[in-house]
Amino acid sequence: MMGALEVYAKANQAAIISPFIVGGAMAPVTVAGTLTQVLAEVLAGVAYSQLVRPGAPVIFGAFVTSIDMNSGAPTFGTPEASHITYGAGQLARRMGLPYRSGGSFCGSKLPDAQAAYETANSLNMALLSGVNFMLHACGWLEGGLVSSYEKFVMDADQLGTLHHLAQGIIMDTNGQGMDAIREVGPGGHYLGCEHTQANFKSAFWRSDLFDYKPFETWAEEGSRDTMQLAAERVAKQLGDYQQPHLDEGTREALDAYVAQRKDSMPDAFV
């Protein structure tokens, strides 16, 4: 990684200085202790990049988890990781650096309730801590050891929520809706008022995945849970996929390069 950092810095390309720290294993078990080590490691990488090329762009990174003291496995979506990520965000802003962290982190082996809770905690933590550049935002299971198509589309859907939250509140004339309040008045409803008719398509974020139908309709359609809905969406997206056009000469050159590289490697790495 030092070699990669040197190459990027010499070319004046941004490098993400992102310590990977598991609290309790590679750093102290305390939040403040781990955060101190995160800062020290980031500053060491930033300083080295500036020795290679003064002014080379860098990004403050932090990938931090805690550890399950019973099994030794990393844990995700925990309050300690959130505290450290929030603190690292404050430090990044203090130094005037872009911030890389966050993702759809979870330790679950299936796209189940554990995965949903841990992922939601991780994604919201990233948004609220001021992350500018988020990697690993879709598909994570078992601490990133495996990926899931179904969880990928679940996570992608929920990123829409984060984008909507990040937009903030619109406070212009239309946003305040005073005309609607005057039109409806006491005792009325807003379903048919002019303001609602003009804004109903874009007023609320809408999931492309979740089921909001009444129970009877949901039951008639097969009582599908989120995993089933996600599997159906994956199948549709794969079925609808159209491969982008690629010049045939370019394709042949790429295939030849891949074949050449494979032939040059030991069988164990092919």
Image (cartoon, rainbow, N blue to C red):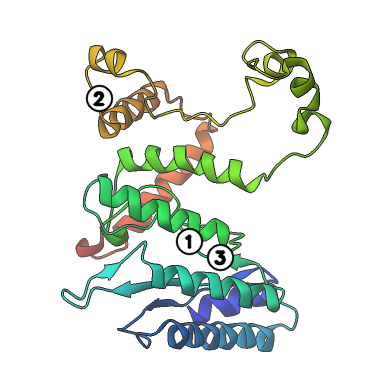
Circles 2 and 1: CB distance less than 8 Å? no
Q: Which residue is mark 1?
A: 102
Q: Position of residue 172 (x, y in %)?
A: 82, 36
Residue that lies at the very extreme toward the front in this rendered image = 186
* 217 to 162, vertically: above or below: above
- Nearer the observer, 173 or 26: 173
**CA separation in Å, label 2 and label 1:** 30 Å
In this rendering, the count of numbered labels is: 3
Characterize the local packing of mark 3: few (<14), some (14-19) or many (20 or more) Cα atoms within 10 angstroms: many
Q: Amino acid at mark 3?
A: Arg
Tell me which residue sits at (59%, 75%) in the image: 7
**CA separation in Å, label 2 and label 3:** 36 Å
Q: Amino acid at mark 1?
A: Gly
Dot placed on the residue nearer the N-terminal end, 2 or 3? 3
Q: Which mark is residue 224?
A: 2
Tell me which residue sits at (31%, 83%) in the image: 24
Q: Position of residue 68 (x, y in %)?
A: 23, 73
